[in-house]
Amino acid sequence: MKRILLLTCLTAGCGGGAENRAAPLHSAVVLTASSDALSGAISLIDLDTLEPVPQIEDASGDAVGRVWLGKYYVVNRVGNEGDNIRVHDPQNNYALVREFSVGSKTEATNAQDICCVSANKCYVPRFSAPDLLVVDPEADEPLVGTVDLADLADDGLPNPNACHVAGDKLLVSLANVDDSDPFLTALEPGSVAVIDTTTDEVTTVYDTTVHNPFTGFVPETESTALVGEVGSWGALDGGFDRIDLDTGEPQGMAVTEKALGGDVGRLAICSTGEAYAIVQTCDVDFNCSTPLVRLDLGTGEVGKTIFDPGEYALTWIAADDRGRLWVADRRSEGQSGVWVYDCDGTRITEEPIDVGLPPAFEGVIQFL
């Protein structure tokens, strides 16, 4: 089932009109998408008052949001408006500064993420391309180079899907899936490529503990991050892999899918050390849910369930620097929104904060 959910999330559309309103100084930035994923928007939630400012700017229906160096980047994935990046200025009411292509003229390359080491140098992993783009978002011609990854997979397409900046290194997770399979079945192994950002050369490649890294890098400590690896879809063979940020080498599972009781979803770690994860569970009839559970990253044990919507609804969680956990709930329009919890698991909001359209799928909540 998770393969089907992933494919659904990789179909994009175009954004509709949006009403501009004043942007609060300190905000949670929330990407939203319509129920059919054919349109989307950027919405805000004031970090001080928790008041929303829905649909301040348009976005596509299948986008990834990232904050880098004071700018908000929207990576539009495959589809009508896919394979491009939009740069928004939070200091100017999130106005669109520029848009540039990161795709191919002949086929979708499916941009997935963006990582910036400076205002003039960012990297873009593309799931269906054999190289990593190097771009300058402020240049007239943004494309300035590539990093060849073709040799890192037997089929020449290692499927880069997430990146993370660690000092002068860029870590890139490589899903390594069977691209001829419509369900994107994982091949073994997945891997983490380590790239020197001063030379743009691949210096090391490590196999991940389990194949198919999926969730991106979530910093755990100054020297470690966690990556969710699904293994085989629907089987309890994955988990959250601990990555050494000094080397890029996987260190083994911090929490396994056997302990989770389902497939790995998104992960958030509070500054106080509490960790939470979304688990994807489905029965034999493909009735799925996404419970939110508490984790002990020291012992690998899974604690109590904080929230279970009873359906496939929770898409993203994020922790702010004020000891709060933010949960994106994508139930039907009118019931969807963003829940806010204390990091001890106590719910702060009585109902989800309405951000207009339902929260989207990837990179949903960022903080500025």
Image: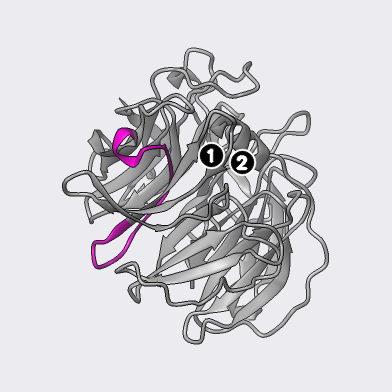
From the viewer's perspective, is residue 96 above or below residue 202?
Answer: below
Is 113 in front, or is 199? 113
> Which sits in the foreground, 87 or 60?
60
Q: Say which label, 2 or 1, has the lower sequence index.
A: 2
Query: Mark 1 = which residue?
Result: 125
Rendered residue at 75%/79% (across/down): 20
Give the percent coordinates (x, y) of residue 133. 56, 39
Q: Secondary structure at mark 2?
A: loop
Q: Is residue 158 magenta?
A: no
Rendered residue at 41%/18% (across/down): 188
Question: The disc labelled 2 sits on which kind of residue?
Answer: Ala
Instruction: Tell me: residue 203, above or below residue 24.
Output: above
Colour scheme in use: one colour
Q: Is residue 280 left or right of residue 223?
A: right
From this viewpoint, is residue 171 visible?
A: yes
The circle on residue 25 is: none
Q: Is residue 49 above or below residue 242?
A: below
Is residue 264 on the magenta stretch? yes
**Residue at the top extreme, as displayed:** 154
Name the amino acid, label 1: Pro
Q: Which residue is mark 2?
A: 111
User: Where does residue 24 sit, x and y in percent of width and height?
Assistant: 57, 84
Residue projecting furthest to the right: 17
Q: Position of residue 209 (x, y in %)?
A: 29, 28
For the residues labelled 2 and 1, say whether their Cβ atoms are less than 8 Å apart: yes
> Bounds of the magenta span?
258-275
